[in-house]
Amino acid sequence: MARYRGPVCRLCRREGMKLFLKGERCYKPSCPIEKRGTQPPGQHGRNVRRAKLIGYGEQLREKQKVKRIYGLLERQFRLYFERAARMKGVTGENLLSLLERRLDNSVYRLGYATSRAQARQLVRHGHISVNGRKVNIPSFQVKVGDEVAVNEGSRVNIHIQSALQTASGRGRPNWLEIASLDEMKGRVLALPRREDIGQSINEQLIVELYSK
């Protein structure tokens, strides 16, 4: 599957905020946002003034930001939007709920990975199971009552162990809980709500963009 393979720190600088794409580095002084501020990437970034975005430009930047947070490409993201639009309720909130319920995001939110990219790799490599069955599809949608766990043979994985040691600093949303810390099992308590999304997102701008 196609995915972005370039430097990710420049994506944060392009959006002018931390997207937490680099794992633990995002929480350290070595983070480019901490060192260079929110100046745009590139050799002329220091001398570039950010124009005030209005209308289409503002909507486009918001869509790009959310795509980058969850590590999706345009076609995948549009399919999520179309699915959200068919659901009952508020389209923007439905969209964020679908993105939060991706298995790779759930693994990240439970603290088994330091970034969504790392969580996606753990899922792809067969380290994660749902309700006792191995699932290697990052886009798998978890539902209420599902048990998301690290497979027994993967619990000694150094990356998972390291992520769990720093998980408290990243926080855990209310719709997830750790059912067993020793067995590395988490549980989906409820569907994610709008207030469970920690980062600053204006989903209405995305709805306006795709509704044109």
Image (cartoon, grey):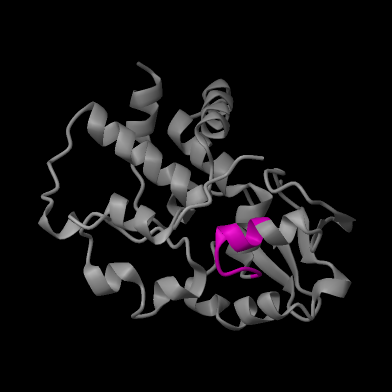
Q: Residue at left 55%, top 29%?
A: 75
Q: Provide residue 205's location: percent of width, then percent of height.
A: 32, 33
Image quadrant assignment for residue 133: bottom right
**Quadrant into which the N terminus falls:** top right
Q: Is residue 34 above or below residue 81?
A: below
Horizontal arrangement in the rendering, residue 114 relative to residue 92 (left or right) = right
Report whether 21 appears left or right of 136: left
Q: Quadrant of residue 167?
A: bottom right
Vertical order, 142 against 177 (above or below):
above
Foreground of the two, 84 or 90: 84
Q: Quadrant of the C terminus?
A: top left
Q: Nearer the viewer, residue 54 or 191?
A: 54
Query: Where residue 149 sits in the image (x, y, percent)?
Result: 78, 65
Could you say where residue 139 lies in the image, as x and y percent from the top left?
A: 67, 43
The reply to whether the magenta stretch includes residue 107 is no
- Residue shown at 32% from the left, 69% from the top: 32
**From this viewpoint, is residue 94 visible?**
yes
116 part of magenta stretch: yes
Quadrant hosting residue 97:
top right
Question: Which stretch did the figure color magenta?
Answer: 112-120
Point out residue 27 in the picture as x, y percentages from the top left corner.
Answer: 41, 75
- Left or right of residue 13: residue 97: right
| Residue found farthest to the front | 43
